């Protein structure tokens, strides 16, 4: 019997054997994987091991070659250098374009995650880690632009996760809101996905809202905290609009879109949440503008800023909003 041999890297140290093997046997069920382990078709340092065996860095893992199937995945598109905001051994920070998903939602999607994975594979050898996979560290909707952070090491992923839990970083967005927001507002709400919450106390935003929205303000939802501050005012075909700075203290799905609508200022063009339909190059304009880290042990700058796109700038100009001195 022929075996394929791979060597555990430093990021694999202390991880379960079955978690590492899943990377090579993605199409196999867990029952088949455990059966292969019991039969000695997968060995660590020449020995049969249980699924929960903790691998050490430098260990030799042998997998029967007939178990490993060649990948049928298409070669992903390369990562455009124009998107790069920051990179070190722990993090990759990109300025996400409009209408490109962070992760693939449909079969033919071109996702940032696929591009980042290919870029990571080109820069790292298998010897560095068998189990670690780079991936997005926070949420950004398909039609939202701006800062998105991907992990480049296990240590980076763990630190970022803890930083989010402890609220030691600040996330600041720019949004074109429908209506005139006269002063700063703090939005404290509970929000939940509609498919999970059909309670009578769920509050609809408007009698004219589209049926496509997925998040509701509901008493039994999860807490969401945002602070919206007006920066400038303009009009879109006679409709008052506000360029707002929105800082979020939590990261719920569609948080800004749902809360802005609930408080009477939906994103202009966001018809799923009650906004007036617009005819522009984007459906609505929401941009992750600044990420502030402060002091940190992993080489991140104090602050990362992502410039707005030419489409966003054009929209502000169309609304007669002078933004150069504001951002």
Image: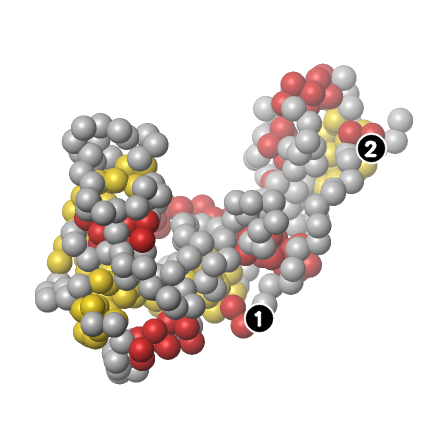
Q: Which residue lies furthest to the right in this view?
A: 1
- Where in the figure is residue 93, as x and y percent of width and height? 47, 62
Q: In this view, does 30 lie to the left or right of 39?
A: left
- Where in the figure is residue 112, as x and y percent of width and height? 54, 56
Residue found 66% across the figure and 34% down from its top: 26
Q: Nearer the viewer, mark 1 or mark 2?
A: 1
Residue found 77% across the figure and 35% down from its top: 69
Viewer-proximal residue among 55 and 35: 35
State the separation of the CA atoms marked 1 and 2.
37 Å
Nearest to N terminus: mark 1 or mark 2: 2
Q: In this view, does 97 lie to the left or right of 191?
A: right
Q: Can residue 165 be seen in this view?
A: no
Q: Can residue 70 be seen in this view?
A: yes
- Residue 183 occupies quadrant: bottom left
Q: What residue is pinned by disc 2?
A: 65
- Examine the rendered structure and indicate whether residue 178 appears above or below residue 46: below
- Examine the rendered structure and indicate whether residue 60 appears above or below residue 32: below
Q: In this view, does 175 lie to the left or right of 264?
A: right
Element at label 1: helix
Q: Quadrant of the N terminus?
A: top right
- Where in the figure is residue 138, as x and y percent of width and height? 41, 50
Residue found 39% across the figure and 68% down from its top: 280
Q: How crowded is mark 2: few (under 14 residues within 10 Å), some or many (20 or more)?
A: some
Q: What residue is pinned by disc 1?
A: 81
């Amino acid at each position: 019997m022929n075996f394929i041999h791979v060597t555990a890297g430093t990021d694999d140290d202390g991880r379960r054997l079955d978690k590492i093997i899943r990377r090579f046997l993605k199409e196999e069920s867990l029952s088949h994987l455990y059966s292969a382990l019991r039969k000695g078709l997968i060995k660590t340092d020449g020995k049969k091991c249980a699924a929960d065996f903790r691998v050490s860095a430098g260990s030799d893992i042998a997998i029967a070659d007939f178990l490993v199937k060649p990948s049928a995945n298409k070669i992903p598109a390369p990562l455009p250098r124009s998107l790069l905001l920051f990179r070190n051994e722990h993090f990759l920070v990109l300025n996400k374009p409009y209408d490109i998903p962070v992760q693939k939602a449909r079969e033919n999607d071109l996702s940032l995650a696929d591009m980042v994975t290919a870029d990571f594979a080109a820069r790292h050898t298998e010897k560095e880690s068998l189990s670690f996979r780079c991936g997005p560290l926070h949420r950004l909707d398909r039609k939202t632009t701006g800062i998105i952070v991907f992990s480049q090491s296990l240590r980076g992923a763990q630190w970022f996760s803890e930083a989010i839990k402890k609220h030691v970083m600040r996330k600041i967005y720019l949004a074109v809101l429908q209506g005139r927001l006269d002063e700063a507002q703090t939005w404290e709400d509970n929000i939940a996905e509609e498919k999970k919450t059909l309670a009578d106390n769920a509050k609809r935003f408007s009698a004219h809202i589209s049926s496509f929205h997925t998040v509701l303000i509901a008493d039994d939802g999860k807490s969401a905290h945002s602070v919206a501050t007006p920066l400038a005012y303009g009009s879109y075909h006679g409709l008052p609009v506000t360029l707002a700075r929105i800082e979020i203290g939590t990261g719920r799905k569609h948080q800004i879109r749902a809360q802005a609508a609930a408080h009477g200022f939906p994103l202009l063009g966001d018809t799923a949440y009650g906004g007036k339909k617009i005819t522009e190059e984007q459906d609505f304009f929401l941009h992750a503008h600044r990420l502030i880290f402060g002091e940190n042990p992993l080489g991140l700058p104090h602050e990362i800023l992502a410039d707005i796109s030419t489409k966003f700038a054009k929209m502000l100009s169309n609304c007669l909003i002078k933004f150069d001195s504001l951002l």
